[in-house]
Amino acid sequence: MNDSRLNTIEHIREFLEGTANVDFSIPADASRLHAFVATVIKRYRYFQLPKRQRGVLFAYLQRLTGYSRQHLSRLLAQYRETKTLKPQNRASRTSFFCRYRREDRVLLAEMDSLHDTLSGPAT
């Protein structure tokens, strides 16, 4: 997005007031969104601003990225600690702790076949 005309917090406030009913289509690429958030933080020196101006920038970032308040707060905390924003790697939804090893499963299958395929609780 080209936001080079928004030089001051007052310009951003006017922008937010004028676009109350406008939805933006932002690419879902997390690395590009994180890069955008990082550039806004750097350009306006987010952490050095007074609280009221930080609130305006926060609303601006929320509107343009589509991030929730909680997610954006996490990103700001990450930037404050590391000075970078990287998408977090997370485990897949089905990566549960494996209780049985491969050998255990083979033994369970053998026992199941020896007992004529009983139900799970009976085994």
Image (cartoon, helix red, strand yellow):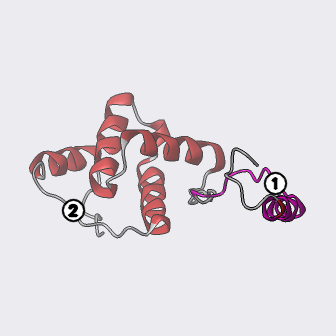
Residue 57 on image: x %, y %:
33, 44
Which sits in the foreground, 22 or 112? Answer: 112
- Is 22 a magenta residue? no
Locate residue 12 relative to residue 37 in the image: left or right. Answer: left
Q: In which quarter of the view is residue 93 placed?
A: bottom right
Q: Which residue matches tag 2?
A: 24
Query: Does dot 1 land on a helix, a strand or a loop?
Result: loop
Q: Residue at position x 18%, y 48% from top?
A: 16
Direction front: furthest residue: 116
Q: Which mark is residue 109?
A: none
Q: Residue at x 24, y 66 (%)?
A: 25
Quadrant of the rendered image containing residue 59: top left
Q: Nearer the viewer, mark 1 or mark 2?
A: 1
- Residue that carries the numbered disc 1 in the rendered image: 100
Question: Residue 29 at x, y = what percent?
Answer: 43, 69
The boundaries of the magenta stretch are 93-113
Secondary element under disc 2, as helix, strand or loop, is loop
On the picture, is 121 further left or further right than 45? Answer: right
Going from N to C along the chain, the mark reached first, 1 or 2, is 2
